[in-house]
Image (cartoon, grey):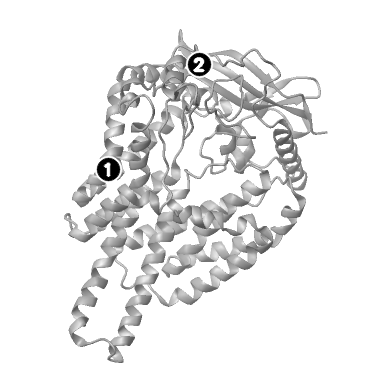
Amino acid sequence: MPIFNFIADYSSAWHPERALLIYLSIAVACTLAAIIKYDDVPQYLRIIIKGLAVFLGFYSLWLGGEFSSVNDNVQNGIGHFITIVPFIVLAATVAAIFRPSFALLPPLYLLIHKDLTRVMSGARELGRNDYAPLVEVLVFTAGAVVALGLFAKAIEILKREQKIPERFHAGVQQGIEALPLIILCMAVGAHLGNYFMSGMAKIHLDGGAFAWVTDNPTSSLMLAGYNVGAAPGAYAPGLFGFAYGILRAVEPYLNVITLAAQCLCFLAFLRVRAMLAFTLFFDMMHIAIFFLTGALFVPWILLNSLLASAFVAMKMDRLPKEAMIAGVLVTIMGHTVFYNARLGWYDSRELRDSYFTAITETGEEYRVPNSFFRQSSYLMYTRNFGYREHRAPSRHVPTSQWGQIGIGVQSDEIANYEIMSATKTCSYHSPYENDVSVVDYDGEAASNFVSSYHQMMLEKKNKSGKTPSYHLYPHHHYSMPVRYKGFEALNMEDIAGYRYNVETVCLNWQDGAFKRDVLVSTKTDIIPVK
């Protein structure tokens, strides 16, 4: 069972009343293991452990403790956890600079916090791809270093008591000295496995092994990002349109480069220079994705940067054979143990756009930026409120809000490749398109979510005198204020209600401007909040 999924499935998040006790027990264990210092830990591992611990510590504290609850009993069960544990995490973040065992506490708090968000908001659809790799790499690396340190101390005790024959001393010491590089390569492999499995996901899409390379309209991601208001290009539409035209022209070549880099990333272990080259390439890819689409992988960018720094700190280029083999195996087969993102799908400019609108007392209606929902903002971009492609009849094209087709799902009636081919010309039509009685989401869940969240934000504003910031928050996708001027000008008190909207839209960039045509529309009644 994958380590991350095992921890998540049995984490204290699903048992909020026991969260504090469980976390305190972990903190005690980490304190006892603090006898292990960084003295014998190579610099390349110190860079990874300290860097990730500090980042994840402050990142998790940045998330805050506001949960819009649909379950008052659960809400009351985590009060002490949210009040006390952040102080432990802050102390552990600082202590991790001096002792590796304390580096285990920030990622586990982040994991529990994210799962608490699922419980408190009733949104179990929230994804893990943006933070899971960092949690696992740090838990594995810090845990392995601490375990190695305890093992080395135990060996020294056994040597002094002469319980290990002297003829074995040299071999045991060689093994201890070889393990840090093996730990490094396994940690790197756990991360590169995300890219490798994403490449495999693209190859295994229906339509053929190379259908994604030859036919996928990757440039459609730019239109989807602009549509949801996440693309920074909203501040320079002319430049955005120019970049979109270039991307469309080089699309097949870009697809080839992307797939090759992902599927061949296990070759990074041939040389340290190759590991450095792959991590820097993936960093540049993530940065380009943000500027073109608005999808921001800050945690992944930071992890790649820390790994690159660790490689620079190494005083070698050729890795020992056992470390090389360990890295390759974990990259290719690590998904059996580690959580691996599988970012492989077909893109589409005809997509299912789901969003909330805020309605004032005078009847004006403004689209709500996804960032407004802070800890649940990621939910808005993916499957939400019971929707999942092909699970039930739908009037809409079976995609996410980003136009993703075939993320681990497919229909028995039509191939995802055929859906993608039809959406290229916005010609996909659901057999239920004209049946207004068909609804593919849970309207009550949407209503409970937005009303409880609004009340929480209103209470926070009444206490502090200002609306809690949702721009200065660690989002995976930021909403550009320029695309939401109407909502930005509203006061919370001006909002009388919300409406949940689902639309099939056709996106394009035409005559120097963004074009959005609504093909099918479904919406809830007004959800009152006053």
Tell me which amino acid carries mark 2: Leu
Residue 450 at x, y = what percent? 71, 36
- In which quadrant is the N terminus drawn? bottom left
How many numbered tags mark residues here?
Answer: 2
View extreme (front): residue: 412
Q: Quadrant of residue 165?
A: bottom left
Depth check: 316 or 186 in front? 186
State the separation of the CA atoms marked 2 and 1.
34 Å
View extreme (top): residue: 511
Residue highlighted by disc 2:
507
> Disc 2 vs disc 1: which is toward the camera?
1
Q: Find numbered disc 2 in the image and state the secondary structure of the residue it sits on.
A: strand
Left or right position of 381 against 416: right
Residue highlighted by disc 1:
265
Residue 519 at x, y = what percent? 59, 12
Depth check: 51 or 355 in front? 355
